[in-house]
Amino acid sequence: MKKVYLRTFGCQMNEYDSERLLALLSGEYVPCQAPEEADLILINTCSVRRKAEEKVYSMAGRFKHLKARRPEIIIGICGCVAQQEGERLLKRFPHLDLVLGPQNIYRIREILEEIERTRRPQVRVEMESGFRPPVVVPSLDGKRPIKAQVTIMQGCDNFCSYCVVPYVRGREISRPPEDILREIECLVRQGVREVTLLGQNVNSYGKKEKGFPSFAELLRMVAEIPDLWRIRFTTSHPRDLSEDLMRAFAEVKKLCEHLHLPVQSGSNRILRRMNRGYTREEYLEKIRRLREICPEIALTTDIIVGFPGETEEDFAETLFLLEEVRYDEIFSFKYSDRPYARAREFPEKVPEEVKAERLSRVHTLQARITEEINRSYIGREVEVLVEGPSETRPELWTGRTRTNHVVNFSAPPGLDLKGALVYVFIKDTGKHSLRGEYRRTIQGP
């Protein structure tokens, strides 16, 4: 049996694609932990942020010497950087054998056969407007999986001025609901109890396809699958957050009370320059309505600091918004120019040292808010889906609440709680997690 070394960079969509790559290669390849052992090396890439792209180039460069020692090894770059750069990657890294865009990963077997037959590099980055990914369910081989991700749509039509996604993932394409349901049912039969539905903008699911359900309707369909306990989704665009989807948080019992709703900036002027399609006031009104419908909902978001032209006053508006919304957690980044994105041509670039200072202020403010929210859980009993023993403290169990907070907790010896739904009494908090004590099992694994 041949060996494959697969390294994934970037978001949950990339992790999903990597799982499918391994499933498509199974039967001929088995995963290995070291590139030196591999017959096939694949780097699955993300180009949303420059830092992730630079890590890909650094890793690809290091494999030059391995290729020199073992010419028979096949080395490939997959995903968004492959789509973005195409043939240019072969010029930059002549030791590459394969450049594979996101739509083409499903052809991996036939492309590898072509490389082995001709010993010529292959570049496959063509995109089809009507592309529909096939149903590929990885075999979980008795690993007692608890959670899984399922892509429901690919691409994006929003063209935010800072974003490369529409150019490397293509325009929005929704998967047929029957394919999604079949994939989830297969995962549940293998023991999965929680699924996260993925898309660049899941709120737009089905809008372009005749006869497809809305995203809120799809959630209700998924909730009907027996033995599935929890549903999550990411990512949502605020502009497309409908009243029906908001109501789903109160009406669909399997839908967890957590929403990732990227705001990016608190300044209306910057939001216009970003082409986000909503105002600060419209965003805050949706937050108000969400909390009216589902008071216990936990919110997370993305923030970009230092967008071209962002003044200190614009940045202050972002800080004010963080104080007003009080997110449970945020993911914040310094702006970086991306290929194809319109903002790379914008003047008034913010100096790196200013971006770094603003990012530090965001982190300081959010750390306080997160700590205050976490401390509000002390003394409460929460539902936790147990993922397994803690990696850093194996004597403790770890899992997540419905609001997506990590919980590390103690339990009587001899209990096997992996995959169980339990109640945990929260006694304390850490910097990024809650700490508690097992109370009782709601539902066994």
Image (spheres, rainbow, N blue to C red):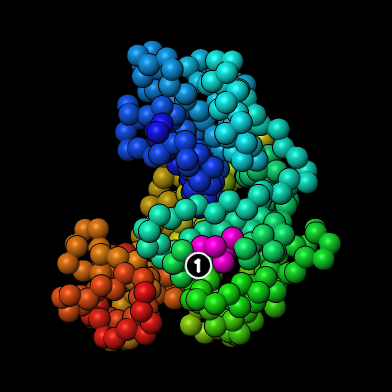
195 in magenta: no
- Amino acid found under the numbered disc labelled 1: Val
Tell me if mark 1 has few (under 14), some (14-19) or many (20+) residues whose alpha carbon lies within 10 angstroms of its own: many
* Residue at the image point whose x is 63% and y is 69% from the top: 283
> How many numbered marks, from 0 up?
1
Q: Which residue corresponds to the image point at 84% horizontal and 62% vertical from the top-left?
A: 210
Q: Position of residue 55 (x, y in %)?
A: 42, 34
Q: Predominant secondary structure in magenta?
A: helix
Image spot of residue 287 (x, y percent)? 59, 75
Q: Residue at x 70, y 56 (%)?
A: 175
Q: Residue furthest right?
A: 210
Q: Secondary structure at mark 1?
A: helix
Q: Quadrant of the C terminus?
A: bottom left
57 left or right of 69 in image: right
**416 horizontally vs 395: left or right:** right
x and y percentages locating residue 19 in the rendered image: 49, 48
The residue depicted at 61 percent of the width and 85 percent of the height is: 251
Say whether residue 184 is magenta.
yes
Towards the viewer: 88 or 196? 196
The quadrant the N terminus occupies is top left
User: Which residue is labeled 1 in the image?
Assistant: 188
Which residue is more in the foreground, 313 or 304?
Answer: 304
- Residue 205 higher or lower than 15, as above or below: below
Measuring from the top left, give residue 201's x and y in whole percent: 65, 58
Examine the image and state in which quarter residue 121 appears. top right
Q: Is residue 47 left or right of residue 386?
A: right
Left or right position of 122 against 425:
right
Magenta range is 183-189
* Residue 89 shows up from this direction: no
Residue 177 in view in this figure: yes
